[in-house]
Image (tube, rainbow, N blue to C red):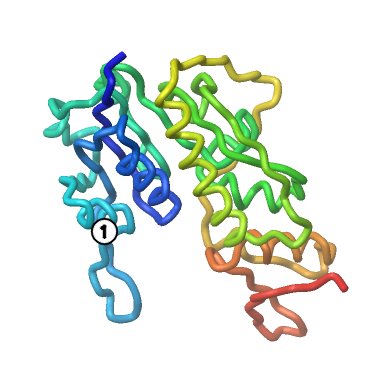
């Protein structure tokens, strides 16, 4: 294995930034390219806003590409790439892309795989009332989040944990585990298919709750998991309400 690894990093939101920063800071890693989602209009004035990962890369003088469809734009495929590192990028990668890195395509996922494969693992851990979660570094495969496990780190979920607090704890845990994994020989372990659970991308409909059909605990979990996005809404006596915070005491 080379003394210094060339890394192409694919990520988009704030969750990805600690992983990118950790790779940039490590002497054994050289980030040769950052791939991120296109800038998006934000707010009432629809101001075009770059994703956090792009801002981080530009701060460090690293080249950035933002393809609308990464599987159709392979203009970057000849970039030096020992590892393709993917952290909350937001697009599913083709087999052709997964075969680009010299060593492996690697992903940081915010759950203890095989539990909560998919796009919303943090929220679903809270919705299900899980007492622990963590991060997984996996070798990517064609099947989403089904790759061999390279490393895992477990953390308890506090009884009043929110999406924001858990997100902010898991992001640096994933960053630390990623660097530790890439800088030592890989030891892949096949996932146990008997423990698989799935979670899909959230929509506004996920935030609609019915107090007549749900327990107080279920609504409380929804608020802790789904604020700020997609938010939680209900109707009481035909009055529409937006729930921002709840308490069971």
Residue in view at x 65 percent, y 28 percent: 196
Local SS, label 1: helix
Q: Position of residue 20 (x, y in %)?
A: 35, 45
Residue in view at x 17 percent, y 51 percent: 61
Relative height, residue 154 to residue 189 (above, below): below
Q: How many marks?
A: 1
Horizontal relation, residue 48 to residue 91: left or right: left
Q: Dot 1 surroundings within 10 Å: few (below 14), some, or many (20 or more)?
A: some
> Which quadrant would residue 27 be assigned to in this image?
top left
Relative height, residue 63 to residue 164 (above, below): above
Comparing 195 with 134, the one in front is: 134
Comparing 127 with 209, the one in front is: 127
Relative height, residue 117 to residue 228 (above, below): above
Q: Position of residue 142 (x, y in %)?
A: 41, 22
Horizontal relation, residue 88 to residue 241: left or right: left
Quadrant containing the N terminus in the rendered view: top left
Q: Position of residue 135 (x, y in %)?
A: 57, 38
The residue identified by callout 1 is 55
Residue in view at x 61 percent, y 60 percent: 165
Quadrant containing the C terminus in the rendered view: bottom right
Comparing 178 with 3, the one in front is: 3
Horizontal relation, residue 117 to residue 141: left or right: right
The outermost residue toward the right is 249
Residue in view at x 51 percent, y 41 percent: 174
> Which quadrant would residue 72 be assigned to in this image?
top left
Horizontal relation, residue 69 to residue 246: left or right: left
Q: Position of residue 105 (x, y in %)?
A: 36, 25
Comparing 144 with 139, the one in front is: 139
């Amino acid at each position: 294995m080379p003394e210094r690894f060339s890394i192409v990093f694919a990520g988009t939101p704030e969750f990805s930034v600690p992983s990118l920063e950790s790779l940039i800071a490590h002497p054994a890693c050289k980030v040769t390219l950052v791939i991120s989602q296109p800038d998006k209009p934000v707010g009432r004035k629809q101001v075009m806003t770059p994703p956090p990962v792009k801002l981080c890369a530009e701060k460090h003088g690293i080249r950035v590409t933002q393809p609308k469809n990464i599987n159709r734009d392979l203009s970057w495929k000849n970039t030096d790439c020992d590892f393709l590192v993917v952290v909350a990028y937001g697009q599913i990668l083709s087999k052709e892309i997964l075969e680009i890195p010299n060593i492996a395509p690697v992903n940081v996922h915010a759950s203890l795989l095989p539990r909560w494969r998919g796009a919303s693992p943090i929220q679903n851990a809270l919705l299900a009332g899980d007492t622990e979660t963590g991060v997984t570094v996996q070798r990517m495969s064609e099947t989403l989040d089904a790759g061999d496990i390279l490393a895992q780190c477990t953390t308890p979920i506090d009884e009043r944990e929110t999406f924001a607090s858990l997100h902010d704890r898991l992001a640096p845990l994933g960053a630390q585990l990623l660097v530790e994994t890439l800088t030592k020989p890989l030891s892949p372990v096949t996932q146990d298919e008997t423990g698989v659970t799935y979670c899909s991308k959230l929509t506004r409909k996920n935030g609609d709750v019915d107090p007549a059909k749900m327990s107080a605990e279920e609504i409380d979990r929804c608020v802790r998991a789904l604020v700020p996005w997609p938010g939680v809404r209900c109707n009481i006596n035909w009055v529409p309400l937006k729930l921002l915070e709840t308490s069971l005491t």
